[in-house]
Amino acid sequence: MIQKLSEHDREKLQESLAHSGQKVTAQREIVFAVLLAKRDHPTVEDVFQRARESMPGLSLATVYNCLETFVGCGLVRQVNHERESTRYCPNLAPHAHFRDEATGHVHDIELPPEIIQSLRSILPPGFNSETIEISFHGRSQESAPRSTSN
Amino acid sequence: MIQKLSEHDREKLQESLAHSGQKVTAQREIVFAVLLAKRDHPTVEDVFQRARESMPGLSLATVYNCLETFVGCGLVRQVNHERESTRYCPNLAPHAHFRDEATGHVHDIELPPEIIQSLRSILPPGFNSETIEISFHGRSQESAPRSTSN
DNA sequence: GAATGAGTTGGAATGATTCCAACTTGCAAG
DNA sequence: CTTGCAAGTTGGAATCATTCCAACTCATTC
Ligand SMILES: [Mn+2]
Ligand SMILES: [Mn+2]
Ligand SMILES: [Zn+2]
Ligand SMILES: [Zn+2]
């Protein structure tokens, strides 16, 4: 039953939407709140389920619409791994993703600016990149072979 | 009308397949030859079209099967960008991809080992990655505002 | 030359996403 | 107040890459 947006977050939402000439709606508030509440890179379907608890009449189409809108105004990022369902991430800091193949969970990995620089530097002259995506794939301790105690 | 596989490439094919208990077939030879002939990261559909010129009866399902087999035995890599059709790349050297948004073309970008190292090093303890994918998105000179002459 | 197993084939099924046309809302103009 | 947009929402249909499946082909083994 998702917690309402903080004053700060509501403002961020309103501002970002306004910047691209769009309005805050009840649906958008809830979808945004869902993303902020649990930053686990949910799929559209995940968001749909969670948001529905607060707004039973919400439609899947609207969730797609809201998320597309948010991506458009830079409030969230899309995260793709292979051909799986697209996931959404409200973390705006530069970061890479680690996909745990045991659990399916996606973790944010902070990206130091110098790494980003060194990556840009490997591009041959004439290549101008506006976006760099980095994703790791493997296993994390999380999918724990529980070594401590027990 | 795709050139036949060189002796060397045919051996690589045969060896890799054998390693995972599979055989060389006429279809696999052609699909592999198509990948080697033009290393432009073709989609399944692209491969299908090109391969059909040499083998009119070839089916799309078989192209899917061959490519999956090749990925399985490490002969080619899958390349995904956002939700577009999967592309295939026979370049086995460690490299990143640059997707030119003007042309849709995908370019290989060589990845120096030290960059790979530095990337691995940003993973928090407990994260073991077996794969790192890096993709750039932007414009290259290729989609040329033709400045020279004219 | 029947049996076996791998591979191939065409078409059906799947599933995420997109499209669409009707409906709702919030607000502005008269 | 009514009326009239324009933006947003909705449910269901359409799309399209990919996967699934059951029948068929082939090469090899007994
Ligand atoms: Mn793996
Ligand atoms: Mn772009
Ligand atoms: Zn993230
Ligand atoms: Zn490549």
Image (cartoon, coloured by chain):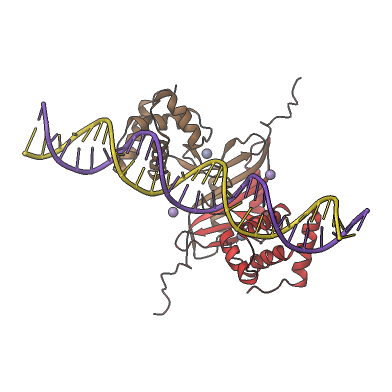
Chain colours: A brown, B red, C yellow, D purple
Pick the residue in front: B124 or A141. Answer: A141
Instruction: Measuring from the top left, give residue B121's x and y in whole percent.
Output: 65, 44
Instruction: Measuring from the top left, give residue B108's x and y in whole percent.
Output: 59, 61
Residue drawn 69% across the image and 32% down it: A141
Quarter of the rendered image showing ligand 1? top right
Pick the residue in front: B123 or C1. Answer: C1
Instruction: Measuring from the top left, give residue B44's x and y in whole percent.
Output: 59, 59
Residue drawn 64% across the image and 64% down it: B58
Relative side of A24 to B53, left or right? left
Instruction: Measuring from the top left, give residue B143's x and y in whole percent.
Output: 45, 67
Relative side of D24 to A124, left or right? right
Relative side of A15 to B35, left or right? left
Q: Is residue B145 visible?
A: yes
Residue drawn 51% across the image and 49% down it: B83
Relative side of B22 to B113, left or right? right
Most distant residue in the bottom direction: B150
Q: Is residue A118 visible?
A: no
Residue drawn 62% across the image and 42% down it: B122
Residue B114 lies, with reference to residue D8, above or below; the image says below
Residue A53 lies, with reference to residue A63, above or below; the image says above
**What count of labels does the image hold?**
0
- Image quadrant occupied by the C terminus of chain A: top right
**Residue A66 occupies which quadrant of the picture?**
top left
Residue A12 lies, with reference to residue A113, above or below; the image says above
- Image quadrant occupied by the N terminus of chain A: top left
Most distant residue in the top direction: A150
